[in-house]
Amino acid sequence: MTDAVTTRTTPSRWRDRVVAAAALVTVWMLLWGVFSWANLISGLLVAAVVLTVFPLPPVTFAGRPRPVGLLRFAGRFLADLVVASVQLAVLAFRFGHRPRSAIIRVPLRVRSDLVLTLTGEAVSLIPGSLIVDTDQASTTLYIHVIGVADRDAVERFRRQVYETEARIVRAIGSAAEISMLAKERLP
């Protein structure tokens, strides 16, 4: 009986490790900003060291990759990256203007460590925003945002984070997580 349970959980543990390694390599490549074989190989080595020396808690991947959802996420992420870069450049070259910033609390709708992590990474990679803290128990992100002029700008940014979360869930989430998006109302 123990062997049957072990054989069922072993492939899922390997799958979780492969997903974690792929996520770490992706973040590594995005941080370097240049795709090269040297960066890919060094990212694989860093991921292997991190997963071996610093064992991560088990993050289960209950969903499945959906190519259309992944393409939508990637396309919108690239568009957001370009728009945010231009907005930040405009803020940087407005002499005499001191941009206002805020720390925004965004409780996510899907209770998943993987969705929390991926949403936080996606938001942090966009220029002008940075994750300050996360609350794993309530799946809440605390995000520092530059260039928010008023309460409406704060709410627009919060809605963008929810849209990012939804795109991630639709790209890799389970059917239960996707239906959770429809049931949960935005705060």
Image (tube, rainbow, N blue to C red):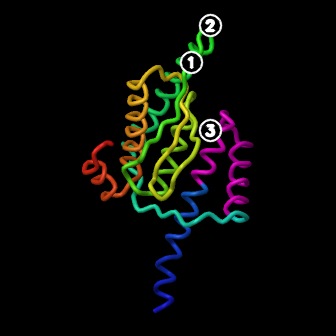
At 48% across and 36% down in the image, what residue appears?
104
Q: Classify mark 1: helix, strand or loop.
A: loop
Which image quarter is the C terminus in?
Answer: top left
Q: Could you tell me if the residues under marks 1 and 2 are in contact, i.e. CB atoms within 8 Å?
A: no
Which region is colored magenta? 22-51
At 41% across and 44% down in the image, what residue appears?
165
Q: Answer with left or right where residue 184 lies relative to residue 144.
A: left
Between 40 and 187, which is closer to the camera in this rendering? Answer: 187
Residue 169, image x, y percentages? 39, 49
Residue 119, image x, y percentages? 48, 45
The residue at which mark 2 appears reads as 96
Mark 2, Cα crowd under 10 Å, few <14 / some 14-19 / many 20+, is few
Residue 142, image x, y percentages? 52, 42
Question: Residue 33: within the magenta?
Answer: yes
Between 138 and 75, which is closer to the camera in this rendering? Answer: 138
Mark pair 1, 2: CA separation: 10 Å
Quadrant housing residue 72: top left
Q: Answer with left or right where residue 111 lies relative to residue 92.
A: left
